[in-house]
Image: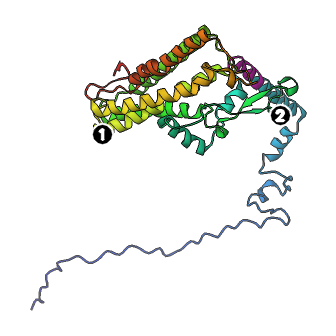
Amino acid sequence: MQRGTYHPPPAHSPPLHHPVPQHVSTVPMMRSPPPPQGAYNGSPYAGQMGGQPQQQGGGGPFAPAFGGFMNDQTAQIGLQFGQKAAMAGQEYMEQSLNRYVSIPALKHYFNVSTPYVLRKLLLVLFPWRHKPWSREQRPSTASQDPNAPNNAYSYYFLPPRDDLNSPDMYIPVMAFVTYILLFTLLAGLRGAFHPEVMGLTATAAFAVVAIEILGLKFGTYILSISNDSQLLDLVAYSGYKFVGVIVTLVLASIINRGQGTGGWAGWTIFTYTFLANAFFLLRSLKYVLLPDSSSATPAGGMQTVARSQRNRRTQFLFLYSYVVQFVFMWVLSRQDGGSGKAVGVKV
């Protein structure tokens, strides 16, 4: 008996086949019923509200409830009471603030324009050839000065945007904030920045301004110098020094390559800005502290004074414009690039 030829099994097993289901079940397609006629008003959920038509001005299923709340008389009374309470609080705040500072007078100092700001900055830095220095006045009307009796012999000073010699508070306030930010930036560029630098700089600058204003107020009281807007004028004039201090800090830092305001360059720039600011204050305050008979006006801000009183006022004006300003500007502009000392405070 002869055997057949032996064939070895294949090297690879045959491929697997997954079972194929013999009975295929089909799922019926579910479709929503069409919405009723007239219930679809542009909202896909209008049909789910039971076919109820939306109220006019409604924004959803809760709109009628809120609309009813707003139409309720109790709600209206509550809103009116809240409005009256807010108005009463605002009036109380204005009356309390007007006890110390006149809001209309304060708005007068911020009535500036862009050309005025540019010209005023040039005047503070280059005051040598400017003329005249007296402030302009105009007769007031009922709309401009309603408290004036019969508007007879009543004058008012022009706002800063109309008079270059008028003091403003926009430049001093902006210069004050710029000085704090600039001083902090320069401290960071020198590697002497600390979280306390900005707070210490702002505190020192505010202290300088407060001490200066208190000294000026005491001096005007001793010399019997009275003016309706005297305090605001002094605040405005005391803030112009920050313009010269900013220029000193920037130019000295550029020339000294961030090493502070020392050296011959820093002292040269500081000397010029100090003299410019002192000359500006001397000329600007002369018509307030040293009036004469030829400059007397019905406004009451310039009156004739005795010779002895005039001499004392001249000495006070010179002391304030040169000695006091030199000390305060030196304190504000002093920087030490190596140790991080600034404004007389070690940081």
Circle nearer the N terminus (2, 1): 2
Residue type at tag 1: Ile
- Residue 104: x and y in percent read 72, 28
* Residue 239 visible: no
Q: Nearer the viewer, residue 76 or 172?
A: 172
- Labelled disc at residue 143: 2
- Labelled disc at residue 286: none
Task: Residue lying at the far left in this picture: please name it.
Answer: 2
Residue at 73% x, 61% y: name it.
44
Q: Nearer the viewer, residue 79 or 37?
A: 79
* Residue 282 visible: yes
- Labelled disc at residue 255: 1
In the picture, measured across the screen, residue 70 lies left or right of residue 123, that is: right
Is 99 one of the magenta-colored residues? yes
Tell me the magenta residue range.
90-101
Report how many numbered discs are placed on residues in the image. 2
Q: Is residue 218 above or below residue 158?
A: above
Q: Quadrant of residue 84?
A: top right
Instruction: Name the quarter where the C terminus is drawn.
Output: top left
Q: Nearer the viewer, residue 60 or 263?
A: 263
Residue at 25% x, 28% y: name it.
338
In the picture, measured across the screen, residue 228 lies left or right of residue 121, that is: right
Instruction: Name the quarter where the N terminus is drawn.
Output: bottom left
Residue type at tag 2: Ser
Residue at 12% x, 85% y: name it.
6
Circle 1 residues within 10 Å: few <14, some 14–19, many ≥20:
some
Circle 2 residues within 10 Å: few <14, some 14–19, many ≥20:
few
Q: Main secondary structure of the magenta part?
A: helix
Q: Quadrant of residue 26?
A: bottom right
- Secondary structure state at the residue bearing disc 2: loop
